[in-house]
Image: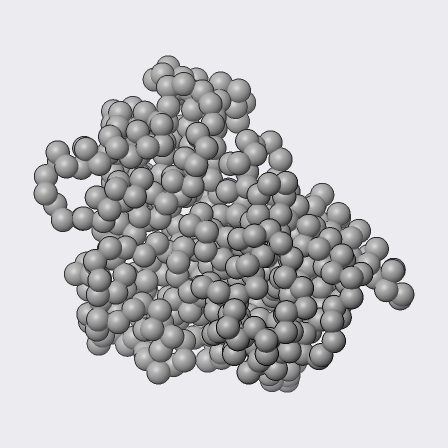
Amino acid sequence: MTREEQLIEAFVEAADTLVDDFDVIEFLHTVAGRCVQLLDVDAAGLMLADQYGQLHATAASTESARLLELFELQADAGPCMDAYRTGSQVVNADLEASQERWPRFAEAAQATGFVSVHALPLQLRATIIGALNLFCARPGALSDADVRTGQALADVATIGILAQRGLHQADLLTTQLQNALNSRVTIEQAKGVLAERRGITVDQAFAVLRAYVRSHNVHLSDLARQIADGTSTAADLLFGPQSPDVDGRRLESAE
Amino acid sequence: MAVVLALLDDDRQRGANPRQRVAARAAAALEVDGICAGLGTGPSGVVLAWGREAVSVTLEDLQFTLGQGPGLDAAAGAPVLVPDLAAAAARWPVFAPAAAELGVRAVFALPLRIGAISVGTLLAHRATAGPLVDGALADAFALADAVTLLLLHRQSTGTGRAGPVGDGPQPGWAPPAAYRAEVHQATGMISVQLGVSLAEALVRLRAHAYADGRLIAEVAADVVARRLRFDGHDL
């Protein structure tokens, strides 16, 4: 498939998602994944602002603790905070040269293996609701075309968050953001429950959750809530593969 | 609103009068006539009521008795904002006219929750139709955060009751919205370790941090890294 065909597919997928009943966190994960697929970047993530103006990581292309840590470090200073506060794009920020600008974040991002970083604002008209964060592990600047595509994906994410209609504008925005942020909290709780029950790490727990969602066609948020509050009856998920004869794969190979 | 929340933080029982002042200020800040925090079990489940208390309690009673209403819908997880109850009558065909007879024209219901932890619903009402004024919804969410923590500790069955409403050794509160992911992960892990609800697990986590004079985020990091287990012998 050519890149153009991939781009078209990504946007059609987004449009389809917005029409159907959809799960906002799952949708944002898809957007993050598309960023890595379509742009010359190695990791992507979306941060949303709560009512206190604090940014929270909501979805990422990989859910490794190390990557999520890079988001949390930006609470005080980082490209996402800059993009969120100013509404301007942060493009091709070399981490080596950004030590003064974002001391803790730049050091941690470099230690993780990244060389440059970008942040594009999630903005609808006059309101900025967060930022799309992109990381590169290889030197070289992000092309103008990639920046434009990245901003378009960021815009798609923003619209997805606001997909519900029929409410007063300001209320809609605040309400939808609250929903997204709270869904994320539920997912974190579910990760903890699953990690403890299965004796695995929280990163592995998230991989198990996503794999289950894909193979059982359920909403990530619904599943997370059931796992977290103990109402889930998904035996395979709670206890692991039941019969080694039928499913001899070890947990480490779960996708 | 910051003053209102600071007053809320002082959960010591000093009598009804100071609470009524806080109540009136909360209602005024949101420009509504009344607010109540309910458990969804009718009048007996109204834990806190501010402003026009009688109307608030009756609204809770109506919803519980009729089995319909914005508060019940919000308990499912999403805020339900009804700036014009008359226009939304089709959604709650029995509740809406009954509420109108009470003189209620607008209702705003916020779930009181932290992820999958649900402690109740915050219900605000007004005698005139119209959306919450600019900024009021954000304030309402901030109020919901504070009330959630209050209810969380009230519900606690045992060791957590000695804990603070605030975060860490300092007075004052940190809203659940400020929690790092690890706090929520640790909550999940502790709920399995102790065999308790998520709500109880969070209370235990906060109490442990308070007792040790550590930030909740630090204790949570220890739990997630499996350096610390809650096995029933913690505080």
Q: Residue B80: x percent and y percent?
A: 47, 35
Q: Which residue is at a point 43% across and 36% down the rendered structure image?
A: B135
Q: Is residue A116 above or below residue B43?
A: below
Q: Which residue is at a point 32% across and 78% down the rendered structure image?
A: B229
Taking the image as shown, residue B179 lies to the left or right of residue A250, namely left
Taking the image as shown, residue A50 lies to the left or right of residue A13, namely left
Describe the colour scheme in one phrase: one colour
Image-quadrant location for residue A1: bottom right
Residue B235 in sight from this viewpoint = yes
Q: Residue A120: x percent and y percent?
A: 64, 58
Image-quadrant location for residue B14: top left
In the displayed image of the protein, which residue is found farthest to the right?
A2
Count of all numbered marks drawn on residues in the image:
0
Q: Residue B72: x percent and y percent?
A: 42, 37
Q: Which residue is at a point 28% across and 55% down the rendered structure image?
A: B173
Q: Residue B28: x percent and y percent?
A: 30, 29
Q: Is residue B151 above or below residue B25?
A: below
Depth order, front residue of B149/A80: A80
Taking the image as shown, residue B160 lies to the left or right of residue B65, namely left
Q: Which residue is at a point 41% across and 35% down the rendered structure image?
A: B136
Taking the image as shown, residue A152 lies to the left or right of residue A130, namely right
Residue A218 in sight from this viewpoint = no
Q: Quadrant of the N terminus of chain B?
A: top left
Q: Quadrant of the C terminus of chain B?
A: bottom left
